[in-house]
């Protein structure tokens, strides 16, 4: 058996393809530079669905231009194959992300809820979709003068956000404050109970207008929190922020028996009349001891 002539085989392989004899002296064409500009712009994309769509769109354009550039040069067959393959992968990703983005679109009221309450916290559409799925995408309607909760009677079994209308909150027949769109209806009640506890409303909530709201059942929402700790942290943040807003609204309407505004932050000394404040300071003064007579 004669030994294989590897040198002859290599020469045959070289002769079968065009030979690049020298380097180019000039720069590449405009298509080559345009391709790299598209690729650089693509890697400047952000996160989320829109960030992915931005990224793969520019990468698709960049690899398409690279494929055109590689096709025009007979010495870049492998380069053309790789760029065309990457162009196909990125084009498929654009179609895939656009399809998923279409599937996570919501009704206008849910879009408004996302824009007002969750978008500013950086919640993605994917996580918001899980939140919407937890309430089955249902929006409830409450007629004017109907009650959402009765003091001492209605059980606390859900967490709700008002989407439109206005609700008044009273306790023992006395007005406390209003609830406006994109505020929680029962955030204090929700935060006051542990997952295993049960309770009833200590206030009455009545619709002043035609109201629409979205509600999550406690059990389903706690199951969602167990699966997604990020969503649990988001809800803890927005619920407690809503409670703080309600406390400040109560602070503007709280008065003591003498008609002075009662500040919930500093209830002992805020908004005390000047004469009484001076009298209090006089009582707190310690008389100085006189020197002993000689």
Image (cartoon, grey):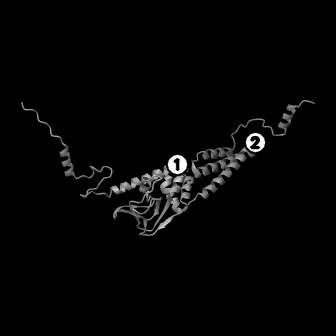
* Residue 121 visible in the current orientation: no
Q: Say which residue appears at 48% left-offset and 56% top-offset.
A: 116
Which of the two residues, 149 or 132, is positioned nearer the viewer here? 149
Circle 2 residue: 78
Q: Say which residue appears at 54% left-offset and 53% top-offset.
A: 224
Circle 1 residue: 230
Q: Viewed as shown, does residue 21 lie left or right of 86? A: right
Q: Say which residue appears at 39% left-offset and 54% top-offset.
A: 245
Measured from the top left, where is residue 249 in percent x and y? Answer: 36, 57
Nearer the N terminus, badge 2 or badge 1? 2
Position of the C terminus by quadrant: top left
Measured from the top left, where is residue 278 in percent x and y? Answer: 19, 48
In this picture, is 140 found above or below 266?
below
Measured from the top left, where is residue 210 in percent x and y? Answer: 45, 68
Position of the N terminus by quadrant: top right
Given the current orientation, which residue lies at the most extreme left position? Answer: 294
Whole-angstrom CA distance, mark 2 to mark 1, is 45 Å
Bin the neighbour count of mark 1 within 10 Å (Cα to Cα): few under 14, some 14-19, many 20 and up: few
Secondary structure state at the residue bearing disc 2: helix
| Marker disc for residue 250 | none
Given the current orientation, which residue lies at the most extreme bottom position? Answer: 144
């Amino acid at each position: 058996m004669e030994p294989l002539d590897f040198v002859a085989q290599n020469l045959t392989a070289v002769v079968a393809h065009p030979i690049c004899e020298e380097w180019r002296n000039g720069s590449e064409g405009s298509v080559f530079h345009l391709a790299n500009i598209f690729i650089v712009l693509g890697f400047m994309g952000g996160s989320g669905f829109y960030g992915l769509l931005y990224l793969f769109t520019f990468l698709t354009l960049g690899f398409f231009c690279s494929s055109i550039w590689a096709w025009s040069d007979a010495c870049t067959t492998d380069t053309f194959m790789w760029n065309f393959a990457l162009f196909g992968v990125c084009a498929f990703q654009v179609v895939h992300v656009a399809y998923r983005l279409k599937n996570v679109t919501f009704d206008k009221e849910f879009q408004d809820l996302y824009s007002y309450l969750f978008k500013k916290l950086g919640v993605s559409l994917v996580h918001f979709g899980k939140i919407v799925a937890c309430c089955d995408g249902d929006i409830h309607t409450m007629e004017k003068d109907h009650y959402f909760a009765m003091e001492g009677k209605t059980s606390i079994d859900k967490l709700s956000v008002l989407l439109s209308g206005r609700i008044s909150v009273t306790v023992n027949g006395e007005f406390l404050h209003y609830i406006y769109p994109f505020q929680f209806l029962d955030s204090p009640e929700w935060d006051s109970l542990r997952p295993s506890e049960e309770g009833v409303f200590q206030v009455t909530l009545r619709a002043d207008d035609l109201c629409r709201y979205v509600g999550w059942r406690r059990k389903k929402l706690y199951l969602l929190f167990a699966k997604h700790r990020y969503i649990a942290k988001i809800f803890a943040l927005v619920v407690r922020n809503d409670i703080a807003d309600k406390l400040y609204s109560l602070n503007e309407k709280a008065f003591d028996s003498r008609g002075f505004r009662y500040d919930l932050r500093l209830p002992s000394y805020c908004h005390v009349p000047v004469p009484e404040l001076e009298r209090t300071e006089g009582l707190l003064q310690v008389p100085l001891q006189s020197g002993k007579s000689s």
